[in-house]
Image: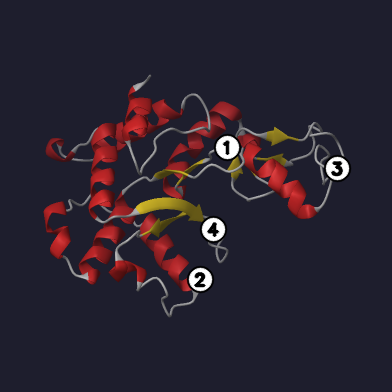
Amino acid sequence: MSEVSNIAAEAPFLQLLLAANPASENILSSHIESMNRKLPPQDRRSLEDIVSYGNYVLEALNMEIKRFREDFRQGEYWLAVIDRGEVSEFNSKLAMSKPHAAQLKDMLDLMFADKQLVGIDVAKLSSSTFSAKTDIIHRMLRNQYFVALEPEYEGQQRVIVSSKLLYSMEPYFKETYGDKSLFKCLGCRHWVLQGKFCSNKKCNTRLHDWCYIPYFRSQGITEGTCPECQHPI
């Protein structure tokens, strides 16, 4: 088992086990090296440091990253949606008065803000106010490259990464697979690198393995036939 897989096996919240391609571990390691080159020696972090640090803070806040959602206002982005578990003070704040789109905009701004890594004093969390805890969440979203593992659906478990990490990996995907490799899933509209492809080479229909059956069921059409060009999938 590789270093990244070892970390993933021990990580209750963040999962660095990417399903996109065999080189994903090298991509993560290379990206962290790139980040470290911009930081002074005392602030540099290893992959294990980042995972452990993220898990430590999430556990202290009794939070878990469940999944990512899209912002339909300005294109599609993957955003961290945090389930704040049994922390009643957080639960009471979930029903915000802001429109849903405004909440997503706030999340988007935080995810894409280009800031230096910020230290978090976890020891003070138990006595923190709601606003202080919220600030901690914001800093985590702003600075970390989150990877989440969703619950199983029909025997399959999907691995999802934040847009910030995906965008950092995009040059590698294009160089390795070519510009035509980056397609959106017909079911969930997220990027597909591996999954169900239409047999017609001129057709861009792509579906994740876990979206394949739910998509056809939701559309009320027969599985195995491309809904765009009627060729086999």
Residue 229 disc label: 3
Residue at 35% of width from left, 27% of height from top?
A: 4
Quote the CA–CA distance across marks 2 and 4: 10 Å
For marks 2 and 4 on the same chain, the one whose residue lies earlier in the sequence: 4
Residue 220 disc label: none
For marks 4 and 3 on the same chain, the one whose residue lies earlier in the sequence: 4
Amino acid tagged 2: Ala
Q: Nearer the viewer, residue 223 or 226?
A: 223
Quote the CA–CA distance across marks 4 and 3: 27 Å
Label 4: which residue? 70
Amino acid tagged 4: Glu
**Is the Cβ of the residue at disc 4 closer than 8 Å to that at disc 3?**
no
Quote the CA–CA distance across marks 1 and 2: 30 Å
**Relative image position of residue 209 (x, y in whole percent):** 65, 37
Quote the CA–CA distance across marks 3 and 1: 27 Å
**Relative image position of residue 1 (x, y in whole percent):** 38, 19
For marks 2 and 3 on the same chain, the one whose residue lies earlier in the sequence: 2
**Relative image position of residue 210 (x, y in whole percent):** 63, 40
Amino acid tagged 1: Gln
